[in-house]
Amino acid sequence: MSDNSLRLVWVYPDLLSTYGDQGNALVVERRARQRGLDVQRVDVRSDQPIPTSGDIYLIGGGEDRPQRLAAERLLRDGGLERAVSNGAIVFSVCAGYQILGKEFVNDQGQRQEGLGLLDVVTLRGEGERCVGDVLADIDPRLGLPQLTGFENHQGVTHLGPTAKPFARVTMGRGNGTGDGTEGAYNDTVFGTYMHGPVMARNPQIADLLLKLALDVNALPAIDDRWYEALRAERIAAATQPA
Ligand code: GLN
């Protein structure tokens, strides 16, 4: 980060932005401004180069074909990998998460190379699609309250030895392997299956990214009553008997 300005990059909104994932960019931007940061937000379409000077990169979910195109273009571009090697933070959702891994199965049933920023491999689940509400406890080292989200994916993601589970599900399927893990992270790169948008439901995730970007342990508190009301509503809706 240079002085008081934060460069926020929203990657490929034309291909990867299902289930309101753009809301993650709005929440990070808003919470950064509330802490007095000057935010420069750049939305990078898939026919444009990925800037390498960003502080935080956000990537959303997508349908199977746009996911294949996005992975091809990101790999050809190489900017995201360069940004991460410069210390940038990346937060990805669903198709974006799968693309950051080493490999996933694409819409043509073929194994496709990912960016290799996370030590995960995604296969096509043989069972039913993972769809529905998610409640998850985040890795205690990240120290955030219970997370709520919504998942919709066919991919099943296996973590390799250098990927840490982002969270553990108490409701929902998460990575879909049956081991209860949800998402993955390593240093400054994060992936989750949770839409929602996940940061509107769990603004503490946005703050986690901001703390990493600013290299601080705490941020000035802000009024989170609306977020907390939404969280309580989503938890009640997810857990009430049908
Ligand atoms: N196409 C991927 C899957 O089904 C990702 C879906 C999504 O991003 N919601 O696994």
Image (cartoon, helix red, strand yellow):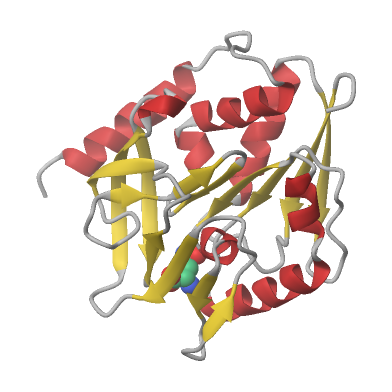
Report the quarter where the N terminus lies. Answer: top right
Height in image: 176 above or below 211?
below
Instruction: Say which of 123 and 86 sits in front.
Output: 86
Residue 216 appears at what percent x and percent y? 66, 15
Height in image: 59 above or below 167?
below
Instruction: Say which of 188 and 127 sits in front.
Output: 188
Residue 86 appears at what percent x and percent y? 80, 42
Instruction: Name the residue: 82% across, 42% down.
Output: 54
Instruction: Name the residue: 50% across, 88% down.
Output: 110
Residue 150 appears at what percent x and percent y? 37, 51
Height in image: 231 above or below 98?
above
Residue 19 in view (yes/no): yes
In which quarter of the view is residue 124 placed? bottom left
Q: Residue furthest front?
A: 161
In which quarter of the view is residue 174 placed? bottom left
Instruction: Name the residue: 47% across, 61% down.
Output: 120
Total numbered labels placed on residues in the image:
0
**Residue 183 located left or right of residue 58:** left
Instruction: Name the residue: 73% across, 47% down.
Output: 84
Q: Residue furthest top?
A: 220
Residue 179 appears at what percent x and percent y? 23, 54
Instruction: Say which of 159 and 96 sits in front.
Output: 159
In which quarter of the view is residue 45 placed? bottom right
**Residue 126 located left or right of residue 66:** left
